[in-house]
Image (cartoon, rainbow, N blue to C red):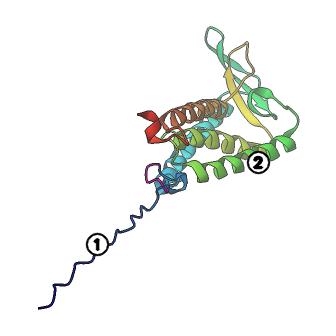
Amino acid sequence: MSEPARAEPARSQLEVRVGSATNALQPIPGASRSLAAGVGQWVGLGLVALAAAGADQLTKSFVAGRLTLGDAVEIAGPFAIHHVRNTGIAFGLFSDSTSIVIVLTAVAIGAMVAFFARSGRRHPLLPVAVGLVLGGSISNLVDRLRLGYVTDFLDLDYWPAFNLADTFIVVGVGVLFVSFVAADRSSPAVGTSPLSRL
């Protein structure tokens, strides 16, 4: 009478976890989702930039059509609407250097678009921040290419006159900084093992 065949010991299966480190505890940084801007981010950026540029062009046209160059209307305290022309960048810097300003602005716009393409998903505020900066920059750039100057009209007496585009750029940079800080605080520390937090 033959002996029953002995059952072979079950072979241990190698467990493979896609997107994990060899210790199966810490995710590989490269496996995280891409931060590149998607369709939603580009649409948001475009809408904000168009709104900023449109508002700037509308107010400039209104002031230029209602006030002659150099005229001012007192509003309240040190604030006045003062029709002036600026051949420089924001707040009168680099006046009479239109060609240099045009080149610098074009380079800055290209850099902002490239940055957004790579990092548009980093924080929900990025489309707003970059949209404000781009809208203001593009609006002023169009005026410099078309007219050789931009119309400034917001005058605080103790500060060089500026326009809505300048305001959008400053606010956009501020929002950009806030979004960077918020994104960094919400990101887990790189290289930290889950076991080290026990």
> Does residue 146 appear anywhere in the picture?
no
Residue 60 in the image: state x and y as whole percent.
Answer: 65, 35
User: Dot 2, crowdedness within 10 Å: few (<14), some or many (≥20)?
Assistant: few
> From what the image shows, is residue 105 above or below residue 78?
below
Range covered by the magenta-colored residues: 22-26
User: Dot 1, crowdedness within 10 Å: few (<14), some or many (≥20)?
Assistant: few
Q: Give the residue number, with chain letter if any, for mark 1.
A: 10
> From what the image shows, is residue 73 above or below residue 119?
above
Identify the image quadrant of residue 165: top right
**In the image, which disc is placed on residue 101?**
none
Identify the image quadrant of residue 15: bottom left
Q: Residue at x 68, y 26 (%)?
A: 153
Q: Secondary structure at mark 2?
A: helix
The magenta stretch spans residue 115 = no
Q: Main secondary structure of the magenta part?
A: loop
Residue 38 shown left or right of residue 76 in the figure: left
Residue 2 in the image: state x and y as whole percent.
Answer: 15, 90
Q: Residue at x 49, y 38 (%)?
A: 188
Q: Nearer the viewer, mark 1 or mark 2?
A: 1
Q: Residue furthest front?
A: 1
| Mark found first going from the N terminus, 1 or 2 | 1
Q: Residue at x 79, y 32 (%)?
A: 86
> For this rendering, which residue is in front, 114 or 106?
114
> For this rendering, which residue is in front, 77 or 125?
125
Q: Residue furthest right?
A: 96
Q: Give the residue number, with chain letter if any, for mark 2.
A: 107
> For this rendering, which residue is in front, 126 or 159?
126
